[in-house]
Image: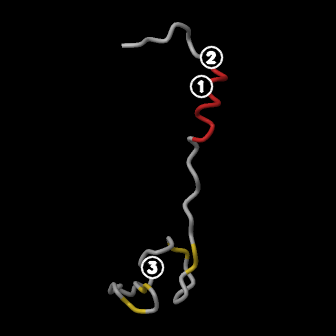
Amino acid sequence: MANPKRRHSKARTAKRRAHDALEPIALSSCPQCHELRAPHRVCPHCGYYKGRQVKAIKEA
């Protein structure tokens, strides 16, 4: 099994990890209730997806 002959510097490690940062969650507004929701998902507030209700939501 191959082993590194020299230690990788902190700069080299940081350069490799530069692309590992988390991206913010993409959100879009629901056309029915105008609340924020994840795209291509059922709205957790009103239960609508693609113009029709697919999930029953209890109203408070």
Could you tell me which secondary element the residue under label 2 belongs to? loop
Q: Which residue in the protein does label 1 denote?
A: 13
Q: Secondary structure at mark 1?
A: helix
Q: Position of residue 6 (x, y in %)?
A: 55, 8
Q: Are marks 2 and 3 in contact (CB under 8 Å)?
A: no
Label 1 crowd bin: few (<14), some (14–19), many (20+), radius 10 Å: few
- Counting every numbered tag in the picture gives 3
Q: CA distance from mark 3 to mark 1?
A: 41 Å
Q: Among all residues in the image, which is located at the extreme bottom?
A: 52
Name the residue at the front extreme.
2
Q: Is residue 9 above or below residue 24?
A: above
- Mark 2 or mark 3: whose residue is earlier in sequence: 2
The answer to whether the residues at label 1 and label 2 have Cβ atoms under 8 Å apart is yes
Residue 19 lies in what quarter of the image?
Answer: top right
Whole-Å distance between the Cαs marked 2 and 3?
47 Å
Left/right placement of residue 56 relative to residue 34 reads: left
Residue at horizontal 56 percent and vertical 69 percent from the top: 27
Disc 2 versus disc 3: nearer the observer: 2
Q: CA distance from mark 1 to mark 2?
A: 6 Å
Depth order, front residue of 58/20 = 20
Which of the image's four quarters has the C terminus?
A: bottom left
> Residue shown at 55%/60% (left/top)?
25
Inspect the image, locate mark 2, and give the three-letter code of the amino acid beneath it: Ser
